[in-house]
Amino acid sequence: MSLWAELRERVTGAGGLEWRDATRTPDLPCADVGGGRRLLFMSWSTLLGRMASSAAGALETATELDIRQLRGLADRMDADAFLPVRAEELGPGFARRMAGLQRLFEDARQRLEDSGIADDFRPFASAAAGHGRYMTIGGSHAWLGIWYPAWPSLRDTPLWLPLIAGADRGRPIEETRRRLAPLVMHEPSDAIEGAAIDRPGSLLVPIMLPTGVAYEAVLDAVVGRLTEVAALLADESSTTS
């Protein structure tokens, strides 16, 4: 709602206008600005949602589908939009959090390597994608790290394990999907199809982080989850002939 706040600032700073809040619902802010004029703010999501409901009520199925497709596009653009910077995000707390996440990833990687659960680690870092390493886990080619594309759109965690099909040491994605059936069938799914964020031919495993606990407990949870995934991937009984 940063645009609504900016509108209020501009109206109150303009000569001959006033601002009296007239909002009745959170998704439809409204204000009287003087002279019998009213300013109404409606997001694309709200507008298209109401249009889709009206089309559904009128049994206009084709129109409803078109509107829902347009709403999907609007939602995608909202997800990719730049968020205004807040003052608290520029302080040392945010920098310490990112440094802590990188430490968590590196410590988890070291434990996996020391225990033989994963190997063949190769560095990979990208300002656009995140911070992580390619590796082999349970016989599957994968990438482990802090992954920005999936974090804001799929699950509330910065740490991800995308399993990559068609790579040199990988296995067919269908086989990987069979081996990870307990995760795929979980609700919500703990093995998400890569097509959800334009990564077809891969499965994305979110590594959820426990909150409100000490660092060692978080590290144990991360390594435990990755150990579980490795066991499923290496289990020959989960395949079909």
Image: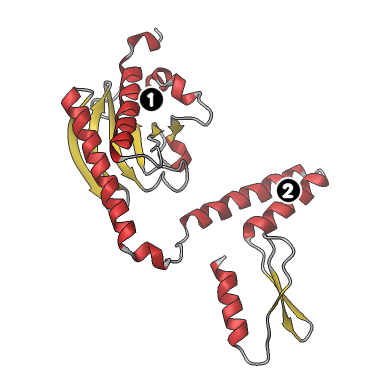
Q: State the scheme by which the image is colored.
A: secondary structure
Mark 2 lies on residue:
63
Helix, strand or loop under label 2: helix
Quadrant holding the C terminus: top left
Q: Residue at x 72, y 49 (%)?
A: 52
Q: Amino acid at mark 2?
A: Thr
The N terminus, quarter of image: bottom right
Looking at the image, which residue sits at the far bottom? Answer: 15
Camera-nearest residue between 14 and 142: 14
Query: Looking at the picture, does residue 200 appear above or below residue 84?
Result: above
Res 132 seen here: no
User: Counting other residues with Cα less than 10 Å from the Cα at mark 2, is it few (<14), some (14-19), or many (20 or more)?
Assistant: some
User: How far across and down, in percent of the image, does residue 123 sit?
Assistant: 18, 41
Q: Which residue is mark 1?
A: 173
Location of residue 2 in the rendering, given as x and y in whole percent from the top left corner? 54, 68
Specify whether residue 90 is in view.
yes
Q: Position of residue 208 (x, y in %)?
A: 40, 36
Q: Quadrant of residue 224?
A: top left
Residue 42 shown left or right of residue 2 in the figure: right
Q: Of the residues shown, which amino acid type is indicated by label 1?
A: Ile
Q: Is 172 drawn above or below residue 121 in the view shown?
A: above
Instruction: Give the residue at x 29% y 40%.
Output: 215
Instruction: Report whether 120 appears left or right of 48.
Output: left
